[in-house]
Image (cartoon, rainbow, N blue to C red):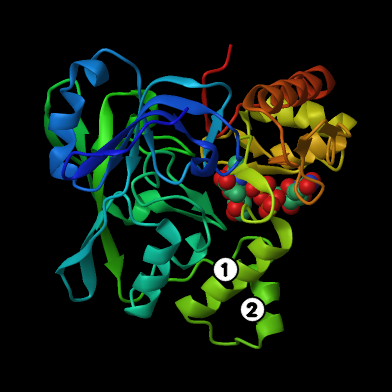
């Protein structure tokens, strides 16, 4: 049973709340307490409630990078703060954005204002506050390079913290916020966006798409349009079928292991990194293991993209997590490579 929503001014509270419409895998999980936060200044007050202080905390943006493997026996904070503020304009603009803004809305707004940089990151689901946590990336760009600082509530020190780019310790789909889970609640992100910059066109498919569009002198908005075409063709739309984008990270392995694997599998897809190690295509590994399109009940691996776990309808979080573990075990047995989930997995037994 869902109780009444209580308006506390700046946030609302609901007990035993359904999260079914708050996660893009559409898992029917519930939270003991749900707080919808509209004013970040109220966060300390909310976190100070005994019921909140004494139980686990989960901060939710759009729930697009999350697998709720069970109910959440704690407090979920739904970030619903809004606001975009240009603090300084010029060749490079400093723009502060509230954590609850939709990422794709912000990207489109920034391109509309003539700021460059975020064009390759268009159409990524989720909120602005979630973007630095896993350092979202696509088509050869990561958000980290455009983040000037992140504002967060530090639940350990009980104060507002401003972390500059270096302090955020960004890496591939990783940051300080992921490595110290539960410590920081991101409330705003400050971006530094240039008016002009060298476009990133090298990722497979971009130049071909631009040529198809007839854009021989591409501007950022052309690149954005090319990325929209590529993503729409390749990735299942969460509005149509429940999914959380790439469910597995591309594993980073030693050069010697890549060579050994390539001996046996000449088609292996790998990208060499600067440190001598290589990133393997997890999608290739999963497809080569024969798992693309796999379905157990309503839990499945997309038949469009092997990295994407999908909910065909009524799969529970536990069923989706069981299927993900089956994929991890099969790829490990077949290639000796350990896959890791990219989304946050909560409530797994
Ligand atoms: N491939 C397959 N089977 C498939 C799909 C892809 O074998 O079903 C192989 C192909 O050889 C392809 C290669 O995998 O060339 C790479 O595929 P893709 O370009 O789709 O990229 P990805 O490595 O699978 C990553 C990100 C995506 C991002 C794309 C484009 C991760 C975990 N995923 O996917 O990010 O959009 O590159 O830049 O890093 C996300 O993080 O949620 C996400 C969607």
Q: Residues within 10 Å of mark 2 (few under 14, many from 20)?
A: many
Q: Which residue is mark 1?
A: 201
Place residue 58 in its image quadrant: top left
**Viewer-side residue, 306 vs 264:** 306
Q: Secondary structure at mark 2?
A: helix
Q: Is the residue under label 1 in contact with that under label 2 (CB below 8 Å)?
A: yes
Name the residue furthest left.
159
Residue 166, position as x, y percentages in the image: 26, 40
Query: Dot 2 corresponds to which residue?
Result: 210
The residue depicted at 76 percent of the width and 31 percent of the height is 259
Residue 329 vertical position relative to residue 276 in the rendered view, above or below = above
Residue 61 position, x and y percent, is 40, 44
From the viewer's perspective, tell me whether residue 193 is left or right of residue 172: left
For residue 232, say whether it is visible: yes
Residue 197 seen: no
Sequence-first tag of 2 and 1: 1
Where 162 sits versus 196, above or below?
above
Q: Is residue 307 left or right of residue 132?
A: right
């Amino acid at each position: 049973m869902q109780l009444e929503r209580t308006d506390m001014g700046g946030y609302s509270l609901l007990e035993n709340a359904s999260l079914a419409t708050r996660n893009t895998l559409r898992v029917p999980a519930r939270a003991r307490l749900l707080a919808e936060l509209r004013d970040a200044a109220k966060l300390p007050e909310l976190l100070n409630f005994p019921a909140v202080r004494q139980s686990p905390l989960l901060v939710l943006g759009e729930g697009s990078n999350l697998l709720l493997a069970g109910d959440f026996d704690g407090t979920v904070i739904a970030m619903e703060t809004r606001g975009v503020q240009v603090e300084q304009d010029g060749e490079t603009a400093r723009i502060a954005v509230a954590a609850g803004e939709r990422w794709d809305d912000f990207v489109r707004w920034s391109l509309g204002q003539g700021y460059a940089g975020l064009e390759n990151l268009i159409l990524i689901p989720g909120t602005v506050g979630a973007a630095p946590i896993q350092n979202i990336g696509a088509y050869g760009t990561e958000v980290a390079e455009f983040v000037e600082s992140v504002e967060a509530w530090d639940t350990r020190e009980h104060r507002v913290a401003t972390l500059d780019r270096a302090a955020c310790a960004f890496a591939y789909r990783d940051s300080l916020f992921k490595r110290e889970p539960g410590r920081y609640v991101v409330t705003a992100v400050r971006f530094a966006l240039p008016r002009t910059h060298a476009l990133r066109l090298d990722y497979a498919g971009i130049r071909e798409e631009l040529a198809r569009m007839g854009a021989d002198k591409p501007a950022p908005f052309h690149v954005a349009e090319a990325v929209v075409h590529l993503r729409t063709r390749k990735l299942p739309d969460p509005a149509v079928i429940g999914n959380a984008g790439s469910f597995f990270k591309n594993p980073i392995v030693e050069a010697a292991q890549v060579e050994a694997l390539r001996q046996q599998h000449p088609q292996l897809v790998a990208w060499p990194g600067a440190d001598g190690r290589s990133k393997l295509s997890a999608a290739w590994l999963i497809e080569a293991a024969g798992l693309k399109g796999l379905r157990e009940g309503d839990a499945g691996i997309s038949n469009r993209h092997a990295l994407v776990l999908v909910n065909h309808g009524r799969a529970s979080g536990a069923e989706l997590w069981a299927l993900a573990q089956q994929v991890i075990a099969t790829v490990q047995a077949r290639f000796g490579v350990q896959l890791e989930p990219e989304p946050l997995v909560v409530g797994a037994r």
